[in-house]
Amino acid sequence: MIRRIASLLLLAWALGFAAFVVWLPDPVEGVTTDAIIVLTGGGNRIERGIELLREGRAERMLVSGVNRTVRPAELAEQVGAPEALFDCCIDLDQDSVDTRSNGEEAARWVNDNEFESVRLVTTDWHMPRAWFEMAERMDPAVTIIADAVPSEPSLTQLFLEYHKYLLRRASALIGL
């Protein structure tokens, strides 16, 4: 009996990992939202958000997890965007230090600005956990669109992220 349960758990874990790897999310085209939330930490995330702003896919953007020493003008120069775009349309969250605190700060920003729909921009392998963190903290009436930046993650990176995702889901299930 114990071996059967252990075998079933192992099979569920393996199938879950396979699904996680095979069904990484893609970028979303043609959708307009009230705002964009970009999580720092991976290549081309901020650039993707700025591209969407320029296309008129949203009016405001939050860049969450920006180093406290970075100023808007410096970030604008780094990503090749006009400083005026940062002045009018981009807010920097410099308090978040991980995906969980990204979710907390983003939810506060969405609530303060009364947005009804947001586009979440992060790397494809990070999207399941990031989306979960946002959905856990935001009003259920807020629509969250997952817009993943394609990458080429290593098997190790996928393995670690899958386990972070599982642990986060389990901790939410038991109320932590």
Image (cartoon, rainbow, N blue to C red):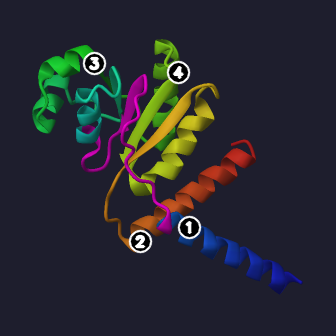
Task: Where is residue 68? Give x, y as percent.
Answer: 28, 30
Tell me the kind of residue under disc 4. Answer: Glu
Closer to the N terminus: mark 3 or mark 2? Answer: 3
Residue 19 - label? 1
Residue 116 - label? 4
In this view, the mark in front (3 or 4):
4
For residue 121, what is the image quadrant? top left
Please say if the residues under marks 1 and 3 sit with CB atoms less than 8 Å apart.
no
Task: Where is residue 66? Give x, y as percent.
Answer: 30, 34
Closer to the N terminus: mark 2 or mark 4? Answer: 4
Label 4 crowd bin: few (<14), some (14–19), many (20+), radius 10 Å: some
Please say if the residues under marks 1 and 2 sit with CB atoms less than 8 Å apart.
no
Kindly identify which residue carries mark 2. Answer: 156
**Real-space Cα distance between discs 1 and 4?**
30 Å
For residue 79, what is the image quadrant? top left
Is 45 part of what is drawn in magenta?
yes
Instruction: Identify whether 29 is placed above or below 149.
Output: above
Mark 4: which secondary structure? loop
Residue beneath the point at 67% across and 49% down = 171
Tell me the kind of residue under disc 3. Answer: Cys
Which span of residues is magenta-colored? 22-46
Instruction: Identify whether 86 is placed above or below 20.
Output: above
Tell me the kind of residue under disc 1. Answer: Ala
